[in-house]
Amino acid sequence: MSATGAKVSKKEQNSNHDGADETSEKEQQEAIEHIDEVQNEIDRLNEQASEEILKVEQKYNKLRQPFFQKRSELIGKIPNFWVTTFVNHPQVSALLGEEDEEALHYLTRVEVTEFEDIKSGYRIDFYFDENVYFENKVLSKEIHLNESGDPTPKSTEIKWKPGKDLTVRSSQTQSKAGKKRQHEEPESFFTWFTDHSDSGADELGEVIKDDIWPNPLQYYLVPDMEDEEGEGEEEDEEGLEDIDEDEDDIEVILQLSCFYSWYC
């Protein structure tokens, strides 16, 4: 074979290779189009599943309401239930200063209500007895979620009594001598009602709604290790003197436990 013939064969070989590349690119493009069609079907099913899951959640949310009401009635029989629950919760307790705890001793009831369609937000209501800190009987905060899920908070204005505004203490970080305190108290729990500038501030609402509200008893029953250590020596001396006083509370706690057990 001549050199010219060899060159022609090489050109034909390159031509065939280019044709194979064009065929491969066409097949890839067709595959991408088919993948897009399949993905659209998956997305459609995901949307349908979300709608059906939401309907189920709405159904059971209504079914849970009478049990939440019964639980609130039982909790009302236990003094300081909610302040104890908040103090025992690791995230919430980080927001509580001494005066916050004192104010929360007047808290008698907490209610979490999801909006009827659930996905648009929720409201948390805090019911208080008459107290020395503020005039309000109920403090509420609503979280409205837009289509993209961004929260827009709306809350009760706290009517503080003279000299009792716990939210201003965070600005009092210096002593009369102008020196900062060595250990600043955490920002007040009640700042959550007034600070709408940062959506991250609504993390507290999510904790109450999704963690505490479904089962507050689990946090109420968390043992206080410091108290246990301090009372260890006294138990031998006191014996069973306080058993009668605690029987009512124990009975109520057992009834509350029925909400979270298959055996009731």
Image: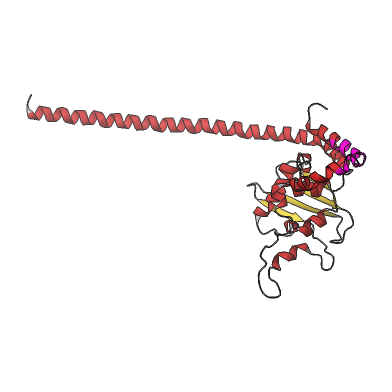
Which residue is drawn at the image coordinates 67% and 59% (left, top)? Answer: 197
Which residue is drawn at the image coordinates 85% and 65% (left, top)? Answer: 161
- The segment highlighted magenta reads 237-253
Task: Please give left or right for residue 43 compared with residue 251 in the image.
Answer: left
Figure disc tally = 0
Quadrant showing the C terminus: top right
Location of residue 75 (image quadrant) = top right
Task: Please say whether residue 252 is one of the residues in the magenta stretch.
Answer: yes
Location of residue 257 (image quadrant) = top right
Q: Position of residue 21 (x, y in %)?
A: 30, 31
Q: Position of residue 194 (x, y in %)?
A: 74, 60
Q: Residue furthest left?
A: 2
Task: Please give left or right for residue 19 compared with residue 101 in the image.
Answer: left
Q: Position of residue 157 (x, y in %)?
A: 79, 60
Q: Position of residue 87 (x, y in %)?
A: 76, 49
Which residue is drawn at the image coordinates 48% and 31% (left, top)? Answer: 35
Q: Residue furthest bottom?
A: 177
Res 12 seen here: yes
Task: Please give left or right for residue 16 compared with residue 119 in the image.
Answer: left
- Residue toward you, 241 or 3: 241
- Residue toward you, 185 or 163: 185
Task: Please say whether residue 46 is one of the residues in the magenta stretch.
Answer: no
Quadrant showing the N terminus: top left
Q: Is residue 111 above or below residue 9?
A: below
Res 122 seen here: no
- Residue toward you, 138 or 249: 249
Which residue is drawn at the image coordinates 93% and 39% (left, top)? Answer: 244
Q: Is residue 105 above or below residue 2?
A: below
Q: Main secondary structure of the magenta part?
A: helix
